[in-house]
Image: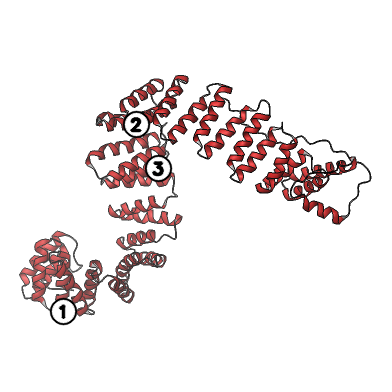
Amino acid sequence: MTRFRNIVLASCCLAILAVAPGFAQSSKKKARAAKEAAAPTPQTQEPSERDKQISEALFLDGLKYYMLEDYQQALQLFQKAYTVTPDNGGLNYKIAETYMALQDAKSAMPFAQAAVAHDSKNAYCYLLLAQTFAEQKQFDAAAQTYNDLIKNVPDSEEYLFNLADLYLSQSQYDNALKTYDRIEKQFGPLEQLLVNRQQIYLRQKNTDKAIAEGEKLLAANPTEVRYFLAQAELYNATQRTDEAIATLNKALRLEPGNPFAHLMLSDLNRQKGNLAESEKEVKIAFASPQLDIDTKVRILVDFIRQLPNPELEKTSLELADLTIQAHPEEAKAYAVAGDLQTIVGKKEAARDNYLKAVKLDDSHFKIWQQLVLLDAELTQTAAMVEHSEQALELFPNQAIFWFYNGTGHLIEKNYDKAAKALERGRILSNGQQELVMQFNMQLGDSYNALKDYKKSDEAYDAVLAQDADNEHVLNNYSYFLSLRNENLPKAKTMAERLVTKFPNNPTYLDTYAWVLYKMGNYTEARKYLEQAVAISDDATMVEHYGDVLYKLGMKEEAVSQWQKAKLKGETSAFIDKKIKEKKLYE
């Protein structure tokens, strides 16, 4: 349909201004006249021909500045011209138009009114006046101006569309509907009128009339799929599910692969309890590249919010796969698939999809964060170091990536790199107490490995000052002190705190026993180590048990435990010597 709404902003016809000799005016009079030109006043005396020529020259100079968008200079020249020929309609129009360019609708209005008064058959004058009213929120006056335009200017019915839009913008729906009736009488049953009427009825919550307009649209446009989809939505909104399904099936006969129709059918079948049919329809929609990636992601996010849910898991994963197949170059497709897989426990697949996502678009911090987190959870230490370093190139001020990088180096026994990364991250995380504590925990381990015991102890003490029951620090700090034979009473207090709280944890039992061993309390140490090895077959614990037995004079039993320890896994460097010489070495 053609809309007759293209408005060309042009000035009203300017009368030819003539100039007559003998014109003169003092500077003072000119200044006073320019000031008085702020509002139109009636001219009591016809200007001379010379006055008209001077006015025309000023007007033309003003037009030059107007075209250069120097509106202030243009306005000054127009106002000077106005002092000479205030009754010129074109000049009044241009002054009003210049004020509007300066966003001063109030000053523009009287000049626009004067322009209409001088040229009541010129549509552009009315349009400018309506604009000045609308800018001042005088919408009734603006509407009346449009009505005056249509009444006074021949063949101007096209501006009924402007009037209707004005009513619509002010939610004057009844007036808008009446104006549409006037348009229909003038131009016939235009498609846009049906659409606009339907939108008004929807805003008025009059769904019956909206549906009726929709039926007219379908009758007038029997091959427009979008109108079938809109009508189906209306039927769905009014719980007329079967009619909605029938309308969508008509749409699919016109366009069998339309993904939006399949999506709506999926939703409608789900409402009716036809879950198998619903799943089939949504898969058809997701397989279509015509269904945009953002719509698919929104739907998948809705699935994510409902997970974990065994009934939805299989379908959601299949939809994620279909999204990737339809949009193999979209990072969003892999990222949302990774989110789904993470929630349902498919962490390796999720990590791989996050990796593909950052290769396509490396600008998203959260995807990098998920990637390195999964590296950590999957104990892929080398990958965690590599990916955290890549992330740090993009986000060097994000403390979390320094944490993963330092932790990865710590696990890989690159202690110097670990300490440097963790120190950098701790500085960046200043003010985030929980994160600072995590850095201090890892720094305590790193500095201990570097034999910088002062910094190690300071880091551990900082954690305990914040969290006195921190298991990691209580265990490692006490154990490392025992290995160093330093501050054993403090080590005993920390280790004892752990076994009191966790009496069946073999690691904590072993740590407490080893502190007791270092303090010479072999009998108590034996008791706790026997509990530990009864729960765990860790090689270090078994070796410790052998050491305690040796100290208690049970050499053969000690050698037996050392032999078991060697078979079970990683032990101390002295294990072979201990076994061979049947003697304790530390």
Task: Point out the residue furthest to the front here.
Answer: 44
Which mark identifies residue 143? Answer: none
Does any portion of residue 288 appear in the rendered image? no
Q: CA distance from mark 2 to mark 3?
A: 35 Å
Secondary structure at numbered mark 2: loop
Helix, strand or loop at mark 3: helix
Q: Quadrant of the C terminus?
A: bottom left
Q: Which corner quadrant holds the N terminus?
A: top right
Q: Residues within 10 Å of mark 3 (few under 14, many from 20)?
A: many
**Residues marked 2 and 3 touching at CB (< 8 Å):** no
Residue 280 or 497: which is nearer the viewer? 280
Question: Most extreme residue toward the right, as rendered?
Answer: 22
Question: Can see residue 164?
Answer: yes
Label 2, label 1: how far apart the Cα atoms are: 81 Å
Asked if marks 1 and 3 touch (Cβ < 8 Å), the reply is no
**Residue 483 percent across, percent down from the top left:** 22, 74
Element type at mark 1: loop
For marks 2 and 3 on the same chain, the one whose residue lies earlier in the sequence: 2
Q: What kind of residue is marked 1?
A: Met
The residue that disc 3 covers is 332
Which one is in front, 319 or 282?
282
Residue carrying label 2 = 238
The amino acid on which the numbered mark 3 sits, given as a three-letter code, is: Lys
Question: How many C-alpha atoms fall within 10 Å of the one at disc 1: few (<14), some, or many (≥20)?
Answer: some
The colour style of the image is secondary structure
Left-right relation of 432 to 129:
left
Q: Quadrant of residue 240?
A: top left
Residue 518 image point, x, y percent: 17, 77
Residue bearing mark 1:
519
Residue type at mark 2? Thr
The residue located at (58%, 28%) in the rendering is: 3
